[in-house]
């Protein structure tokens, strides 16, 4: 697989080896790497840890890279990255990698941040939903992107508690974790709290959109839920 120099999202999920390490201990070690990325990797636009609501031993590392492969290469080359791998390896802290895939941003679709403050977003307790979708054909996919993309602009204006509302297209078939094939769509939503998620779900414009979406032939391949751990960052301060 060749990754170009375009914005992308990477989802990397680990199972903590709880016989040797608590999830909090794992996160404390990882946090040093997250801080290094914030300080030393301007093209790593997000690098945040989140706790799976499906399995309490799983930690998702939510990563975004502004320049695709070149940004990933710079990330891996950091001394802090080698130090993280060494520390976790010596401590036998990780049982296995349970998910790994990369998704190219859909141009002009939704938004990935609420930047504009003087602080990077890294609060604990943010609700994150990942949805995988496979379409009957490219026309159905494009129709879905158009309809939901238009709605995203409305959400950005009237839902301040909706922090992320965007997506990407899978660059390869996943070899582990949830079913994801090249070309499938990943939708990402993040809400400041449960009230914000409910407001989004029950908004009359959102409810009215559902019959339109029901006409688009598609299959939901996965839906995963997480809570941010307060480690790392979802976007950078401006």
Image (cartoon, rainbow, N blue to C red):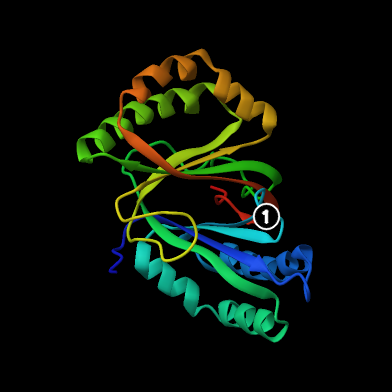
**54 lies left or right of 20:** left
For label 1, the residue is 55
Residue 190: quarter of image: top right
Query: Where residue 108 sits in the image (x, y, percent)?
Result: 33, 38
Q: Residue sitting at 41 percent across and 74 percent down?
A: 73
Q: Nearer the viewer, residue 52 or 231?
A: 52
Residue 65: quarter of image: bottom left
Residue neighbourhood size for the residue with mark 1, other residues' Cα within 10 Å, grouped as few (<14), some (14–19), many (≥20): few
Query: Where residue 51 sits in the image (x, y, percent)?
Result: 67, 53
Q: Secondary structure at mark 1?
A: loop
Q: Residue sitting at 29 percent across and 69 percent down?
A: 1
Q: Residue sitting at 54 percent across and 17 percent down?
A: 203
Q: Nearer the viewer, residue 162 or 42?
A: 162
**Vertical placement of 50 versus 95: above or below?**
above
Q: Residue sitting at 70 percent across and 52 percent down?
A: 230
Query: Where residue 22 sits in the image (x, y, percent)?
Result: 79, 67
**53 lies left or right of 223:** right
Report the number of numbered marks.
1
**229 lies left or right of 165:** right
Query: Where residue 207 sits in the image (x, y, percent)?
Result: 48, 17
């Amino acid at each position: 697989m060749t990754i170009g120099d375009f914005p992308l999202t990477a989802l990397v999920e680990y199972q903590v080896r709880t016989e040797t390490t608590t999830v909090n201990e794992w996160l404390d070690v990882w946090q040093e790497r997250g801080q290094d990325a914030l300080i030393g990797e301007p093209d790593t636009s997000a690098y945040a840890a989140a706790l799976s609501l499906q399995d309490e031993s799983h930690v998702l590392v939510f990563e975004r890279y502004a320049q695709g492969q070149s940004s990933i290469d710079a990330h891996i080359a950091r001394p802090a990255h080698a130090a993280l791998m060494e520390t976790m390896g010596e401590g036998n802290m990780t049982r296995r990698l349970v998910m790994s895939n990369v998704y190219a941003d859909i141009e002009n679709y939704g938004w990935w941040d609420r930047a504009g403050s003087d602080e990077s977003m890294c609060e604990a307790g943010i609700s994150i939903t990942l949805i995988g979708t496979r379409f009957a054909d490219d026309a159905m996919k494009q129709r879905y992107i158009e309809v939901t993309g238009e709605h995203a602009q409305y959400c950005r204006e009237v839902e301040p508690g909706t922090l992320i509302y965007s997506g990407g297209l899978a660059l390869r078939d996943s070899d582990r974790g949830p079913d994801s094939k090249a070309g499938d769509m990943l939708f990402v939503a993040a809400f400041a709290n449960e009230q914000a998620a409910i407001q989004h779900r029950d908004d009359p414009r959102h409810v009215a959109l559902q019959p339109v979406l029901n006409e688009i032939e598609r299959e939901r391949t996965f839906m995963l839920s997480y809570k941010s751990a307060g480690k790392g960052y979802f976007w950078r301060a401006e």
